[in-house]
């Protein structure tokens, strides 16, 4: 295994992790809500609610941050090595997994584990193991 030294950014990664943790803590402390993206987006797209304002602001922040970074001269350019068909199938599978797990990686991995939830620990281990197995199968035995 080798590390792409040009892309290895431990300080930015640490700072980003701290910002995500603080944002999740602020949301739960001041709003009593878990920072799970699937639940926030699902609640925004569902029936009209009294809490749609903070949900819309949260999603706008997710979309607006890379736009702001680009405007400040730090464009975010992900390297996605998949076609639209693969992306759509992957999105569908993530949606199914999110429904079965009653939450997504952000809700379980960031917020649930920090609260000591055994269910979140099990869900996060399952998410990660599935990802590892999928990458292994697609890159090795499948010849990808």
Image (cartoon, helix red, strand yellow):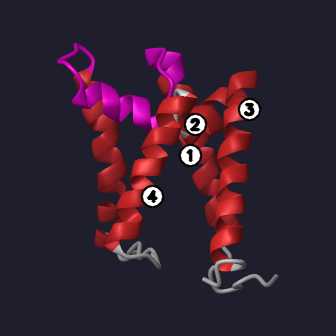
Q: Residue at x 58, y 36 (%)?
A: 22
Q: Residue at x 57, y 31 (%)?
A: 101
Q: Which mark is nearer the camera, 3 or 2?
A: 3
Per the image, label 4 sits on a secondary structure element best described as helix
Q: Residue at x 67, y 52 (%)?
A: 130
Q: Residue at x 25, y 34 (%)?
A: 56
The residue that disc 1 covers is: 19
Per the image, label 2 sits on a secondary structure element best described as helix
The residue that disc 2 covers is: 22
**Considering only order in the chain, which callout, 1 or 3, is on the residue closer to the N terminus?**
1
- Relative to residue 12, is residue 99 drawn left or right? left
The residue that disc 3 covers is: 121
Q: Position of residue 9 (x, y in %)?
A: 66, 72
Give the CA distance from mark 1 to mark 4: 27 Å
Query: Viewer-proximal residue, 13 or 118?
Result: 118
Q: Which mark is nearer the camera, 2 or 4?
A: 4
Does the CB distance between marks 2 and 1 fall below 8 Å?
A: yes
Give the CA distance from mark 4 to mark 3: 22 Å
Give the CA distance from mark 2 to mark 4: 29 Å
Task: Choose top left, top right, bottom left or bottom right for residue 13.
Answer: bottom right
Span highlighted in magenta in the image: 28-51
The residue that disc 4 covers is: 90
Query: Viewer-proximal residue, 6 or 103?
Result: 103
Which residue is the extreme one toward the left?
Answer: 48
């Amino acid at each position: 295994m080798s590390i792409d030294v040009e892309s290895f950014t431990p300080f930015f990664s640490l700072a980003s992790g701290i910002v995500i943790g603080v944002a999740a803590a602020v949301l739960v402390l001041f709003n009593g809500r878990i920072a799970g993206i699937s639940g926030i987006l699902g609640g925004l797209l569902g029936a009209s609610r009294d809490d749609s304002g903070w949900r819309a602001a949260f999603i706008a922040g997710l979309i607006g941050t890379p736009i702001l970074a680009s405007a400040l001269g730090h464009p975010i350019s992900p390297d996605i090595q998949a076609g639209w068909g693969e992306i759509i199938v992957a999105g569908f599978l993530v949606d199914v997994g999110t429904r079965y797990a009653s939450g997504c990686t952000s809700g379980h991995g960031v917020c649930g584990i920090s609260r000591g939830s055994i269910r979140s620990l099990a869900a996060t281990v399952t998410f990660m193991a599935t990802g590892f197995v999928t990458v292994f199968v697609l890159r090795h035995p499948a010849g990808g």
